[in-house]
Image (cartoon, rainbow, N blue to C red):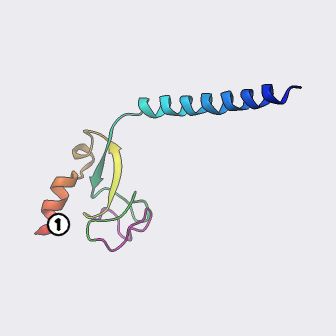
Amino acid sequence: MNHRLIASSALASVLAMGLLSTASAADAPPKEKCFGIAKAGANDCGNLSGTHSCAGQSTVDNSPEEWKFVAKGTCASLGGKTTEEAKKAFKK
């Protein structure tokens, strides 16, 4: 087989895969941080106080400073607080 044909086919495959993954990411619904709903060890990233900066490091269920990503607009129905609400409550 021709090496140029193999190389161009491989490049076309890589480019096509990149376009497919971009299209699926664009279809994902918008998300927002929801504070106070994460179970111990199931938070999505760092907390408000800055005592840790990684996912899965919360030690208490439903800590008001720990958060999870949820579908935009569903945080209040889950019993959580938006980022702005959580920051106001944390400063008190």
Q: Quadrant of residue 38?
A: bottom left
Residue at the left extreme, as displayed = 92
Residue 3 horizontal side relative to residue 11, left or right: right
User: Picture coordinates of residue 45 (x, y %)?
Assistant: 38, 60
In front of the other: 38 or 24: 24
Quadrant for the C terminus in the image: bottom left
The quadrant of the rendering that contains the N terminus is top right
Read off the residue under disc 1.
Answer: 90
Point out residue 59 in the picture as x, y percentages from the top left corner.
38, 71
Direction from residue 60 to residue 25 in the image, left or right: right
Q: Residue at x 27, y 47 (%)?
A: 78
Which kind of residue does numbered mark 1 sit on?
Phe
Give the magenta-colored segment's residue range.
50-63
Most distant residue in the bottom direction: 51
Residue that appears at 17% across and 54% down: 84
Characterize the local packing of mark 1: few (<14), some (14-19) or many (20 or more) Cα atoms within 10 angstroms: few
Which residue is at 26% across, 66% downward? 48
Let me know if residue 70 is in the magenta part.
no
- Asked if the stretch drawn in magenta spans residue 52, the answer is yes
Q: Is residue 17 above or below residue 64?
A: above
